[in-house]
Image (tube, rainbow, N blue to C red):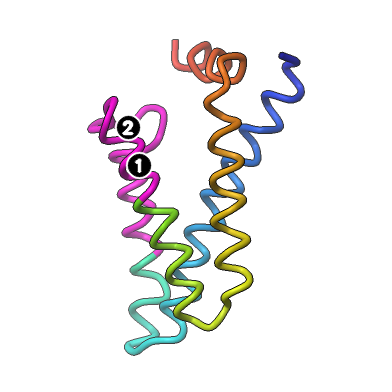
Amino acid sequence: MGAIFGWSVLALVFVDELLAVAAFGVWGWDHDPRWLLVWLLPLVAMAAWFLFASPKARFGGTWVRPIVKVVVFGLASLALWDAGHEDWAVALLVFSVVVNALALLPGIRVLVEEQQL
């Protein structure tokens, strides 16, 4: 698999993570106390990702990493849905599934493993 394709997929995975964090901020903006939730929810999502789902996660594992990814992206989609952005919620969910499925391809996983050495 081409390195350009692999790195493009990994870049899209990063964009997907940023979109999930933004989705939590959108939900926080629509609920009170807005001043607290608009930055606290994205920080909690980032902390969960850092600790459990990132490639170098301290507590990530064979089962923990995929479960946390499903929870974060699922809750981000639900947050958008609840905030009244149903189309964006579905788009985020579909994008997340496709991009993360592509990231599991052996040629792309090799790129990630090479960077962890």
Give the spatial CA distance, label 1 vs label 2. Answer: 6 Å
Magenta range is 42-70
Indicate left or right for 16 with 42 as reference.
Answer: right
Query: Where, by quadrant of the figure, is residue 91 drawn?
Result: bottom right
Q: Is residue 2 above or below residue 8?
A: above
Task: Kindly give the residue lying farthest to the left in the view shown.
Answer: 59
State the SS at label 2.
loop
Q: Where is residue 9 in the image (x, y as percent from the top left)?
A: 66, 33
Whether the residues at callouts 1 and 2 have beta carbons within 8 Å, the answer is yes
| Label 2 Cα crowd, 10 Å radius (few <14 / some 14-19 / many 20+) | some
Indicate left or right for 95 with 59 as reference.
Answer: right
Indicate left or right for 98 with 1 as reference.
Answer: left
Give me the residue at 48% from left, 14% from top: 113
Query: Where, by quadrant of the figure, is residue 76 drawn?
Result: bottom left
Query: Where, by quadrant of the figure, is residue 5 drawn?
Result: top right
Give me the residue at 50% from left, 72% from top: 80
Q: Position of residue 54 (x, y in %)?
A: 40, 35
